[in-house]
Image (spheres, rainbow, N blue to C red):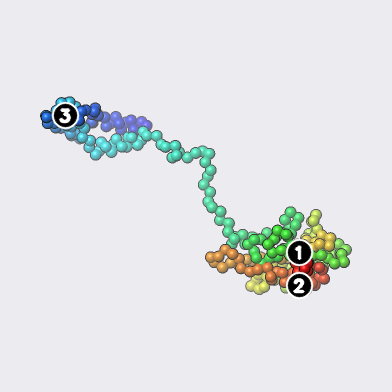
Amino acid sequence: MILGGNLLHHISPALPIPKPYSTKSTSKSAITCKNYDSPKKNSYSFGANSGRPIAIWSNNNLISLAIAVALISPLPCSAIPSLSSKPFSLPSTTTPFSQAKNLPTGLENGKIRPCPSINPSCVSSNPKSSNFAFPWSILGGSSSNTAAIKQLQDALEKTQKDVKIQLVEDTPNGQYLEAEVDGGGFGRRDVLEFLVKGDVVTFRAMATKVTYVYPFTTALGDSKGQEERMKLIVNELGWFAPSFDSMD
């Protein structure tokens, strides 16, 4: 504000500000004179009747006045950032491609997980899964969950290639088994998960690699391969696998 005041103070002595005067025409002509005392040699016009000078502003004076007005004028409220305004955040970079690189396994709230929506090569006995399969029933009962898990491991070794048992653990909801098997070559691996509780076996079979064709974001594949895999395993075990066809 002090800078603006100094500029106005600098302008004022160089040029008097005229007062309004009558614009009525007169028979007398106006007299023009020059102020030779000013360093800028500003010109003034005197009305024949009023004797008041009419300022003829130079470009330098106009620029100085514009700067002074700009400096002393307050900023609009919209130009001042609010302290309560939310910080700018970049859009999320989560894509189906990035999600497919980290597919979670293991139980979720004590249950087998549903198939991920981004992975069509999957089948699960979780009713929330889009690729749903009914849980298995152990015919004739089993001596224990541990015995059923042992039968599952034997069936995997007989029906699948390159079987690697990743985890076997007791949980409050039954005994859990996770295994990796060959996923059809090219280093692909599929994950098989089972939860045995009494005579009920829930499961999920899922490919760990999801294939996309650029620029599409819909994954290739279907659940048929996983369904056939699980049929081989349950037939080897001799357990009952309900289906919609068996309900007709």
Q: Amino acid at mark 3?
A: Gly
* Circle 3: element type: loop
The tag earlier along the polypeptide, 1 or 3, is 3
Give the CA separation, mark 1 to mark 3: 105 Å
- Residue 11 appears in the picture as rendered: yes
Give the CA separation, mark 3 to mark 2: 112 Å
Q: Which residue is mark 1?
A: 134
* Circle 2: element type: helix
Q: Residue at x 66, y 61 (%)?
A: 116
Q: Which residue is mark 3?
A: 47
Q: Quadrant of residue 104?
A: bottom right
The tag earlier along the polypeptide, 1 or 2, is 1
Residue 131 % position (x, y): 69, 64
Outermost residue toward the top in this view:
50
Q: Is residue 208 above or below residue 12?
A: below
Mark in front: 1 vs 2: 1
The tag earlier along the polypeptide, 3 or 2, is 3
Q: Quadrant of residue 66?
A: top left
Residue 5 % position (x, y): 33, 30
Residues marked 3 and 2 touching at CB (< 8 Å): no
Q: Nearer the viewer, residue 5 or 52?
A: 52
Outermost residue toward the front in this view:
248
Q: Is residue 53 above or below residue 140?
A: above
Q: Which quarter of the rendered picture does the N terminus lie within?
A: top left
Give the CA separation, mark 1 to mark 2: 15 Å
Circle 2 residues within 10 Å: few <14, some 14–19, many ≥20: some
Q: Residue at x 22, y 37 (%)?
A: 58
Q: Amino acid at mark 2?
A: Leu
Q: Nearer the viewer, residue 134 or 217?
A: 134
Q: Residue at x 21, y 35 (%)?
A: 56
On residue 232, which mark appears? 2
Say left or right for 230 vs 90. Answer: right
